[in-house]
Image: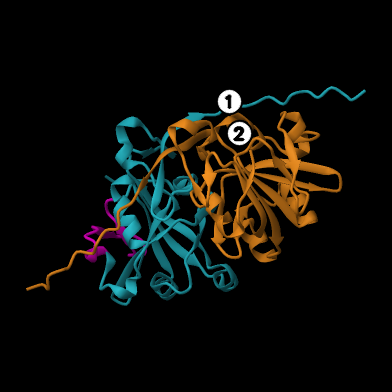
Chain colours: A cyan, B orange
Amino acid sequence: MRQPVELHHASRLINHGPTVLVGSAHGGRRNLMAAAWSMPVEFTPPRIAIVIDKKTFTRELVSASGGFAVSIPGRALLDATYAVGSVSGRDLPDKFSSYGIASFDGPVLGQPFATDAVAWMECRLIPEPHTEDAYDTCFAEVVWAAADPRVFDRGRWSFRDDNTELHTLHHLGGGNFAWPQRSEQATPLAPTIQPPRR
Amino acid sequence: MRQPVELHHASRLINHGPTVLVGSAHGGRRNLMAAAWSMPVEFTPPRIAIVIDKKTFTRELVSASGGFAVSIPGRALLDATYAVGSVSGRDLPDKFSSYGIASFDGPVLGQPFATDAVAWMECRLIPEPHTEDAYDTCFAEVVWAAADPRVFDRGRWSFRDDNTELHTLHHLGGGNFAWPQRSEQATPLAPTIQPPRR
Protein backbone atom coordinates (compact mmCIF):
# COMPACT_ATOMS: atom_id res chain seq x y z
CA MET A 1 0.00 0.00 0.00
CA ARG A 2 1.73 3.17 -1.22
CA GLN A 3 0.74 6.75 -0.54
CA PRO A 4 2.86 9.70 -1.73
CA VAL A 5 4.87 11.50 0.95
CA GLU A 6 5.34 15.24 0.51
CA LEU A 7 9.02 15.91 -0.08
CA HIS A 8 9.40 18.20 2.94
CA HIS A 9 8.40 15.19 5.08
CA ALA A 10 10.74 12.73 3.35
CA SER A 11 13.64 13.10 5.79
CA ARG A 12 11.29 11.97 8.58
CA LEU A 13 11.24 8.52 7.01
CA ILE A 14 14.77 7.80 8.27
CA ASN A 15 14.85 10.29 11.18
CA HIS A 16 14.64 7.45 13.74
CA GLY A 17 17.51 5.40 12.30
CA PRO A 18 16.00 2.39 10.52
CA THR A 19 18.07 -0.03 8.47
CA VAL A 20 17.25 0.49 4.79
CA LEU A 21 17.55 -1.41 1.52
CA VAL A 22 19.43 0.26 -1.33
CA GLY A 23 18.23 -0.69 -4.81
CA SER A 24 20.39 0.17 -7.80
CA ALA A 25 20.33 -0.45 -11.54
CA HIS A 26 22.46 0.41 -14.54
CA GLY A 27 23.01 -1.05 -17.98
CA GLY A 28 20.61 -3.96 -17.55
CA ARG A 29 22.01 -5.08 -14.18
CA ARG A 30 20.46 -4.38 -10.80
CA ASN A 31 21.13 -5.01 -7.13
CA LEU A 32 19.76 -4.69 -3.60
CA MET A 33 21.80 -4.31 -0.42
CA ALA A 34 21.04 -3.54 3.23
CA ALA A 35 22.48 -0.38 4.80
CA ALA A 36 22.31 0.33 8.53
CA TRP A 37 24.24 3.58 8.17
CA SER A 38 22.17 6.44 6.82
CA MET A 39 20.78 9.72 8.11
CA PRO A 40 18.96 12.82 6.90
CA VAL A 41 21.13 15.92 6.53
CA GLU A 42 18.43 18.43 5.54
CA PHE A 43 14.63 18.69 5.48
CA THR A 44 14.18 21.13 2.56
CA PRO A 45 15.35 20.17 0.04
CA PRO A 46 15.29 16.64 1.49
CA ARG A 47 18.83 15.34 1.53
CA ILE A 48 20.37 12.28 3.08
CA ALA A 49 23.80 10.77 3.67
CA ILE A 50 24.33 7.02 3.37
CA VAL A 51 27.37 4.79 3.65
CA ILE A 52 27.88 2.55 0.62
CA ASP A 53 31.22 0.76 0.70
CA LYS A 54 33.34 1.45 -2.38
CA LYS A 55 33.95 -2.28 -2.82
CA THR A 56 30.27 -3.12 -3.26
CA PHE A 57 28.45 -3.87 -6.49
CA THR A 58 25.82 -1.33 -5.39
CA ARG A 59 28.42 1.44 -5.31
CA GLU A 60 29.50 0.55 -8.84
CA LEU A 61 25.91 0.78 -10.11
CA VAL A 62 25.12 3.98 -8.15
CA SER A 63 28.23 5.71 -9.45
CA ALA A 64 27.31 4.73 -12.99
CA SER A 65 23.62 5.68 -12.87
CA GLY A 66 23.75 8.65 -10.48
CA GLY A 67 20.78 7.44 -8.45
CA PHE A 68 19.41 4.78 -6.13
CA ALA A 69 16.19 3.63 -4.49
CA VAL A 70 15.90 3.47 -0.69
CA SER A 71 13.26 1.01 0.53
CA ILE A 72 12.56 0.96 4.26
CA PRO A 73 11.72 -2.60 5.25
CA GLY A 74 9.28 -3.56 7.99
CA ARG A 75 9.42 -6.69 10.11
CA ALA A 76 7.86 -8.74 7.30
CA LEU A 77 11.17 -8.31 5.41
CA LEU A 78 13.41 -9.21 8.39
CA ASP A 79 15.02 -12.32 6.87
CA ALA A 80 15.20 -10.80 3.39
CA THR A 81 16.97 -7.73 4.79
CA TYR A 82 19.56 -9.87 6.52
CA ALA A 83 20.03 -11.99 3.41
CA VAL A 84 20.64 -9.13 0.97
CA GLY A 85 23.01 -7.59 3.50
CA SER A 86 25.12 -10.75 3.75
CA VAL A 87 25.74 -11.69 0.11
CA SER A 88 27.32 -9.68 -2.71
CA GLY A 89 25.26 -8.96 -5.81
CA ARG A 90 28.30 -9.97 -7.84
CA ASP A 91 27.72 -13.58 -6.70
CA LEU A 92 24.08 -13.81 -7.76
CA PRO A 93 22.34 -13.09 -11.04
CA ASP A 94 19.84 -10.69 -9.40
CA LYS A 95 19.16 -10.46 -5.67
CA PHE A 96 15.52 -9.47 -6.17
CA SER A 97 14.63 -12.60 -8.12
CA SER A 98 17.14 -14.82 -6.30
CA TYR A 99 15.42 -14.13 -2.97
CA GLY A 100 11.90 -13.75 -4.33
CA ILE A 101 11.73 -10.04 -3.45
CA ALA A 102 9.04 -8.26 -5.48
CA SER A 103 10.15 -4.99 -7.08
CA PHE A 104 8.88 -1.88 -8.83
CA ASP A 105 10.77 0.86 -10.62
CA GLY A 106 10.91 4.37 -9.21
CA PRO A 107 8.86 6.96 -11.12
CA VAL A 108 11.63 9.56 -11.48
CA LEU A 109 14.90 7.69 -11.97
CA GLY A 110 13.70 4.15 -12.67
CA GLN A 111 15.69 2.73 -9.77
CA PRO A 112 14.40 -0.55 -8.25
CA PHE A 113 12.42 -0.65 -4.99
CA ALA A 114 11.31 -3.56 -2.79
CA THR A 115 7.52 -3.60 -3.15
CA ASP A 116 6.87 -5.15 0.27
CA ALA A 117 8.73 -2.47 2.25
CA VAL A 118 6.82 0.13 4.24
CA ALA A 119 8.36 3.33 2.79
CA TRP A 120 10.32 4.35 -0.28
CA MET A 121 12.60 7.24 -1.28
CA GLU A 122 14.09 7.66 -4.75
CA CYS A 123 17.41 9.48 -4.50
CA ARG A 124 19.65 11.37 -6.90
CA LEU A 125 23.33 11.18 -6.00
CA ILE A 126 25.04 14.51 -5.27
CA PRO A 127 28.60 13.75 -6.40
CA GLU A 128 31.08 14.37 -3.56
CA PRO A 129 34.24 12.52 -4.61
CA HIS A 130 36.18 13.28 -1.41
CA THR A 131 33.65 11.99 1.14
CA GLU A 132 32.70 9.07 -1.10
CA ASP A 133 36.36 8.11 -1.16
CA ALA A 134 37.44 8.94 2.42
CA TYR A 135 34.31 7.82 4.33
CA ASP A 136 32.26 5.82 1.78
CA THR A 137 29.63 8.46 2.50
CA CYS A 138 27.31 9.35 -0.37
CA PHE A 139 25.08 12.42 -0.26
CA ALA A 140 21.83 12.43 -2.21
CA GLU A 141 18.66 14.40 -2.74
CA VAL A 142 15.30 12.67 -2.33
CA VAL A 143 13.30 13.24 -5.53
CA TRP A 144 10.26 11.06 -4.77
CA ALA A 145 8.89 9.45 -1.62
CA ALA A 146 5.98 7.26 -0.56
CA ALA A 147 4.94 5.28 2.50
CA ASP A 148 2.39 2.75 3.67
CA PRO A 149 -0.30 4.94 5.30
CA ARG A 150 -1.02 2.25 7.88
CA VAL A 151 2.33 3.11 9.54
CA PHE A 152 3.39 6.54 8.17
CA ASP A 153 0.78 9.20 7.59
CA ARG A 154 0.74 13.02 7.46
CA GLY A 155 4.52 13.17 7.93
CA ARG A 156 4.74 10.92 10.96
CA TRP A 157 5.47 7.29 11.83
CA SER A 158 2.87 5.59 14.01
CA PHE A 159 4.08 2.35 15.62
CA ARG A 160 1.18 0.60 17.33
CA ASP A 161 0.20 -2.83 18.57
CA ASP A 162 -2.09 -3.30 15.57
CA ASN A 163 0.62 -2.77 12.93
CA THR A 164 3.69 -4.56 14.34
CA GLU A 165 4.49 -6.31 11.04
CA LEU A 166 5.01 -2.84 9.53
CA HIS A 167 7.45 -1.62 12.19
CA THR A 168 10.90 -0.62 10.96
CA LEU A 169 14.06 -2.62 11.62
CA HIS A 170 17.08 -1.28 13.50
CA HIS A 171 20.20 -3.41 13.20
CA LEU A 172 21.99 -4.16 16.47
CA GLY A 173 24.65 -6.34 14.78
CA GLY A 174 25.04 -9.91 13.56
CA GLY A 175 21.53 -10.15 12.15
CA ASN A 176 19.87 -9.07 15.40
CA PHE A 177 17.30 -6.36 14.72
CA ALA A 178 15.30 -4.27 17.16
CA TRP A 179 12.04 -2.62 16.24
CA PRO A 180 10.23 0.34 17.78
CA GLN A 181 7.17 -1.22 19.33
CA ARG A 182 5.79 1.91 20.91
CA SER A 183 6.47 5.59 21.18
CA GLU A 184 6.01 8.23 23.81
CA GLN A 185 5.47 11.97 23.73
CA ALA A 186 8.10 13.94 25.63
CA THR A 187 6.96 16.75 27.91
CA PRO A 188 8.81 20.02 27.49
CA LEU A 189 10.95 20.31 30.59
CA ALA A 190 11.17 23.80 32.08
CA PRO A 191 14.64 24.98 33.05
CA THR A 192 15.23 25.00 36.78
CA ILE A 193 16.21 28.42 38.01
CA GLN A 194 19.60 28.13 39.59
CA PRO A 195 20.02 30.06 42.83
CA PRO A 196 23.14 32.19 42.85
CA ARG A 197 25.97 30.64 44.83
CA ARG A 198 26.67 32.11 48.24
CA MET B 1 26.97 2.50 35.67
CA ARG B 2 29.82 2.81 33.15
CA GLN B 3 31.87 0.04 31.62
CA PRO B 4 34.51 0.72 28.96
CA VAL B 5 33.59 -0.26 25.39
CA GLU B 6 36.40 -1.51 23.17
CA LEU B 7 36.91 0.99 20.38
CA HIS B 8 36.23 -1.52 17.60
CA HIS B 9 32.74 -1.91 19.09
CA ALA B 10 32.07 1.82 19.47
CA SER B 11 30.25 2.26 16.15
CA ARG B 12 27.71 -0.32 17.32
CA LEU B 13 26.51 2.17 19.90
CA ILE B 14 24.73 4.21 17.21
CA ASN B 15 24.30 1.49 14.59
CA HIS B 16 20.55 1.29 15.24
CA GLY B 17 19.90 5.03 14.89
CA PRO B 18 19.28 6.44 18.38
CA THR B 19 18.91 10.14 19.06
CA VAL B 20 22.01 11.37 20.89
CA LEU B 21 23.05 14.28 23.06
CA VAL B 22 26.07 16.33 21.97
CA GLY B 23 28.07 17.89 24.79
CA SER B 24 30.60 20.58 23.99
CA ALA B 25 32.88 22.91 25.92
CA HIS B 26 35.43 25.59 25.14
CA GLY B 27 36.88 28.55 26.98
CA GLY B 28 34.82 28.11 30.13
CA ARG B 29 31.47 27.73 28.33
CA ARG B 30 29.67 24.49 27.68
CA ASN B 31 26.50 23.22 26.03
CA LEU B 32 24.31 20.20 25.39
CA MET B 33 22.03 19.62 22.39
CA ALA B 34 20.00 16.75 20.99
CA ALA B 35 20.86 15.33 17.57
CA ALA B 36 18.68 12.82 15.77
CA TRP B 37 20.94 12.76 12.72
CA SER B 38 24.08 10.71 13.22
CA MET B 39 25.53 7.47 11.88
CA PRO B 40 28.72 5.42 11.97
CA VAL B 41 30.87 5.59 8.85
CA GLU B 42 33.58 3.11 9.84
CA PHE B 43 34.20 0.42 12.49
CA THR B 44 38.01 0.55 12.69
CA PRO B 45 39.06 3.19 13.40
CA PRO B 46 35.62 4.06 14.78
CA ARG B 47 34.34 7.07 12.91
CA ILE B 48 30.97 8.74 12.84
CA ALA B 49 29.15 11.48 10.95
CA ILE B 50 26.76 13.81 12.75
CA VAL B 51 24.72 16.80 11.66
CA ILE B 52 25.34 19.90 13.78
CA ASP B 53 23.72 23.00 12.30
CA LYS B 54 26.20 25.79 11.65
CA LYS B 55 23.91 28.25 13.44
CA THR B 56 24.03 26.38 16.77
CA PHE B 57 26.06 27.29 19.84
CA THR B 58 27.26 23.68 19.89
CA ARG B 59 28.83 24.05 16.44
CA GLU B 60 30.66 27.16 17.61
CA LEU B 61 32.11 25.32 20.61
CA VAL B 62 32.95 22.17 18.61
CA SER B 63 34.76 24.15 15.93
CA ALA B 64 36.75 25.95 18.61
CA SER B 65 37.70 22.92 20.72
CA GLY B 66 37.99 20.26 18.00
CA GLY B 67 35.98 17.72 19.97
CA PHE B 68 32.63 16.79 21.48
CA ALA B 69 30.99 14.24 23.76
CA VAL B 70 28.15 12.03 22.50
CA SER B 71 25.87 10.75 25.26
CA ILE B 72 23.21 8.24 24.24
CA PRO B 73 20.15 8.83 26.40
CA GLY B 74 17.79 6.12 27.58
CA ARG B 75 14.10 6.57 28.33
CA ALA B 76 14.90 8.05 31.75
CA LEU B 77 16.21 11.12 29.89
CA LEU B 78 13.21 11.45 27.54
CA ASP B 79 12.03 14.87 28.71
CA ALA B 80 15.57 16.18 29.17
CA THR B 81 16.45 15.13 25.62
CA TYR B 82 13.47 16.97 24.20
CA ALA B 83 14.24 20.03 26.32
CA VAL B 84 17.88 20.41 25.29
CA GLY B 85 16.84 19.87 21.68
CA SER B 86 14.29 22.70 21.81
CA VAL B 87 16.23 25.59 23.37
CA SER B 88 19.48 27.25 22.27
CA GLY B 89 22.42 27.21 24.64
CA ARG B 90 22.90 30.87 23.82
CA ASP B 91 19.68 31.60 25.75
CA LEU B 92 20.66 29.82 28.97
CA PRO B 93 23.72 30.10 31.18
CA ASP B 94 24.42 26.34 30.99
CA LYS B 95 21.94 23.71 29.83
CA PHE B 96 23.37 21.03 32.13
CA SER B 97 22.74 23.01 35.31
CA SER B 98 19.64 24.78 33.95
CA TYR B 99 17.88 21.45 33.46
CA GLY B 100 19.50 19.62 36.37
CA ILE B 101 21.39 17.22 34.09
CA ALA B 102 24.36 15.65 35.90
CA SER B 103 27.63 15.72 33.95
CA PHE B 104 31.15 14.32 33.89
CA ASP B 105 34.12 15.26 31.76
CA GLY B 106 35.47 12.89 29.14
CA PRO B 107 38.83 11.30 29.97
CA VAL B 108 40.58 12.12 26.69
CA LEU B 109 39.33 15.51 25.54
CA GLY B 110 37.55 16.79 28.66
CA GLN B 111 34.25 17.24 26.79
CA PRO B 112 31.06 17.10 28.91
CA PHE B 113 28.84 14.01 29.06
CA ALA B 114 25.38 13.46 30.56
CA THR B 115 26.01 11.09 33.49
CA ASP B 116 22.54 9.51 33.39
CA ALA B 117 22.74 8.40 29.75
CA VAL B 118 23.25 4.73 28.87
CA ALA B 119 26.32 5.04 26.61
CA TRP B 120 29.03 7.59 25.88
CA MET B 121 31.50 8.30 23.05
CA GLU B 122 34.14 11.01 23.18
CA CYS B 123 34.85 12.25 19.66
CA ARG B 124 37.66 14.19 17.99
CA LEU B 125 36.49 16.28 15.05
CA ILE B 126 38.06 15.44 11.67
CA PRO B 127 37.98 18.84 9.98
CA GLU B 128 36.08 18.68 6.67
CA PRO B 129 35.25 22.29 5.83
CA HIS B 130 33.25 21.50 2.69
CA THR B 131 30.79 18.99 4.18
CA GLU B 132 30.52 20.99 7.40
CA ASP B 133 29.52 23.96 5.29
CA ALA B 134 27.39 22.33 2.58
CA TYR B 135 25.57 19.68 4.67
CA ASP B 136 26.25 20.66 8.32
CA THR B 137 27.82 17.19 8.47
CA CYS B 138 30.74 16.77 10.84
CA PHE B 139 33.00 13.73 10.72
CA ALA B 140 34.75 12.58 13.89
CA GLU B 141 36.82 9.75 15.32
CA VAL B 142 35.68 8.09 18.53
CA VAL B 143 38.60 8.20 21.00
CA TRP B 144 36.87 6.78 24.09
CA ALA B 145 33.63 4.88 24.68
CA ALA B 146 31.69 3.38 27.55
CA ALA B 147 28.23 1.94 28.13
CA ASP B 148 25.93 0.77 30.89
CA PRO B 149 26.52 -3.01 30.95
CA ARG B 150 22.89 -3.62 31.89
CA VAL B 151 21.91 -2.68 28.31
CA PHE B 152 25.14 -2.86 26.21
CA ASP B 153 27.65 -5.60 26.87
CA ARG B 154 30.34 -7.39 24.84
CA GLY B 155 29.71 -5.16 21.85
CA ARG B 156 25.94 -5.59 21.67
CA TRP B 157 22.77 -3.81 22.78
CA SER B 158 20.30 -5.97 24.69
CA PHE B 159 16.80 -4.46 24.94
CA ARG B 160 14.70 -6.54 27.29
CA ASP B 161 11.54 -6.25 29.39
CA ASP B 162 13.64 -5.92 32.55
CA ASN B 163 15.63 -2.88 31.38
CA THR B 164 13.07 -0.70 29.56
CA GLU B 165 14.19 2.51 31.30
CA LEU B 166 17.58 2.03 29.63
CA HIS B 167 16.24 1.63 26.10
CA THR B 168 17.46 4.17 23.56
CA LEU B 169 15.28 6.93 22.09
CA HIS B 170 14.51 7.30 18.39
CA HIS B 171 12.96 10.62 17.42
CA LEU B 172 9.89 10.41 15.18
CA GLY B 173 9.35 14.19 15.15
CA GLY B 174 7.77 16.85 17.35
CA GLY B 175 8.99 15.34 20.62
CA ASN B 176 7.55 11.91 19.88
CA PHE B 177 10.16 9.23 20.53
CA ALA B 178 10.01 5.51 19.82
CA TRP B 179 12.15 3.01 21.65
CA PRO B 180 13.24 -0.51 20.68
CA GLN B 181 11.37 -2.69 23.11
CA ARG B 182 12.49 -6.02 21.75
CA SER B 183 14.74 -7.48 19.13
CA GLU B 184 14.68 -10.51 16.91
CA GLN B 185 17.36 -12.64 15.27
CA ALA B 186 17.04 -12.86 11.50
CA THR B 187 17.41 -16.25 9.84
CA PRO B 188 19.75 -16.35 6.87
CA LEU B 189 17.47 -16.74 3.87
CA ALA B 190 18.73 -19.09 1.16
CA PRO B 191 18.44 -17.83 -2.42
CA THR B 192 15.69 -19.50 -4.38
CA ILE B 193 16.99 -21.15 -7.51
CA GLN B 194 15.26 -19.55 -10.44
CA PRO B 195 14.18 -21.96 -13.17
CA PRO B 196 15.21 -20.77 -16.63
CA ARG B 197 12.34 -19.13 -18.51
CA ARG B 198 10.76 -21.17 -21.26
Left/right of residue B19 with respect to residue A70 in the rendered view: right
Q: Position of residue B107 (x, y in %)?
A: 75, 50
Q: Which mark is residue B111?
A: none
Q: Quadrant of residue A100?
A: bottom left
Left/right of residue A150 with respect to residue B9 in the rendered view: left
Residue found 37% across the figure and 61% down from its top: A85
Q: Position of residue A145 (x, y in %)?
A: 39, 51
Residue closest to the far right: A198
Left/right of residue A103 with respect to residue B71 in the rendered view: left
Q: Which contiguous range is marked in magenta?
A: A96-116
Decide: marks 1, 2 in contact (CB < 8 A)?
Answer: yes
Above or below for B51 versus A108: above
Q: Chain of mark 1?
A: A
Residue found 40% across the figure and 48% down from its top: A177
Nearer-the-camera pick, B79 or A177: A177
Check disc 2 and report the residue beneath it. Answer: B82
Above or below for B103 versus B189: above
Check disc 1 and report the residue beneath it. Answer: A187
